[in-house]
Amino acid sequence: MAWEYDGLFDQVYNEQGADLLGEYWRNLPSSIRVGQMGYRTKTTKAGPRLEAEVYPLFGREQRKRLREAKKNLTPMKQQKLNTERRDRHFVLLAEGNFSEADYHLTLTYQDAPGYDRVKKDVRNFLAKVKRLRVKRGLPELKYLGTIEGGEEDGKTRIHVHLLISGGIERAELEALWGKGYANADKLQMNADGLEAVARYIMKQQKEGRAGRCRKPLQSRNLKQPRSRTNDTKLSNRKVKQIARGFENEAKEIMEKAYPGYSFVKCGVYWSDVVDGVYIRCVMRKWEGRKE
């Protein structure tokens, strides 16, 4: 989806899961203008997760309004959009590369050094894990995480959060750190998959007191999300049904459009500037069923 759409379609009720769909659709305003235009569907897959973004195909006049809307974005709103995009990409990387066989690993220090020293220590730790995996005949190591830290109570506190490949016993993995406290928890899935733990890790980074937001730590062998677009996946009529229809309409339409995937949640966004809506649905692969 073009970057301009993010700033334009900024009216939304909170995204709701399948168990809250009835309440969600009863509260949607009847004044939403879906328009008569066609709609493009961008499908992004990462492991068992599928995200479908549905947005209007605008004509010349509407595209002009999009450009104007982008110019009017405040720095604070643009930063918020950038942060959400980055967090969503982090979620997709987590979903596409890790499962319940892997760990959420937290590393801390007894006496926290500076950020550069922490990066070196983490590299050394990961090198130890890689050597052990080679020795055990395990697949190549994958990891994804952040370094979070800053001043707290007059002391520098650094934490490292990693999603990391399983295959090594928890106690053995924790013992490789040797700089302070280490805790490895098996990843657990819920209806949202790994979204909760992935967003928690990114939130920890953003809320650090170091005064800057650093790039995530990630191995080079991570599978990237795959996206493609389709201009006939959902008709204007189906978009209208999702945006203004009966409470179970989104679930039924999306599961029919994506056989083998189960509906998780859906958000409907609209604009005060132009007609049309932006719909974002999250779905998950049903185990044991073909796509």
Image (cartoon, grey):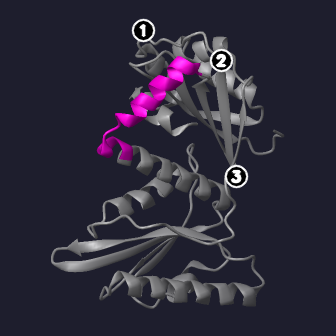
Residue drawn where x is 68% and y is 38% of the image = 43
Mark 2 element type: loop
Which is closer to the viewer, label 3 or label 2? 2
* Front residue (pair 186, 177): 177
Label 1 belongs to which residue?
A: 31
Instruction: Inspect this view and state whether residue 232 appears.
Output: yes
Label 3 belongs to which residue?
A: 47
Within the image, what quadrant is residue 130 found in? bottom right
> What amino acid is labelled 1 in the image?
Ser
Residue 15 % position (x, y): 46, 32
Mark 1 element type: loop
Q: Rate crowding at label 2 as few (under 14), some (14 to 19) or many (20 or more) other CA atoms within 10 Å.
A: some
* Front residue (pair 148, 213): 213
> Which mark, by number, is residue 227?
none
Q: Is residue 38 above or below residue 17?
A: above
> What amino acid is labelled 2 in the image?
Gly
Q: What's the magenta region?
A: 58-78
- Cα–Cα gap, marks 2 and 1: 19 Å
- Cα–Cα gap, marks 3 and 2: 29 Å
Using residue 148 as the reference point, say whether residue 167 is left or right of it: right
Mark found first going from the N terminus, 3 or 2: 2
Q: Rate crowding at label 3 as few (under 14), some (14 to 19) or many (20 or more) other CA atoms within 10 Å.
A: some
> What amino acid is labelled 3 in the image?
Gly
The overriding secondary structure of the stretch rendered in magenta is: helix
Instruction: Inspect this view and state whether residue 13 appears.
Output: no
Label 2 belongs to which residue?
A: 38
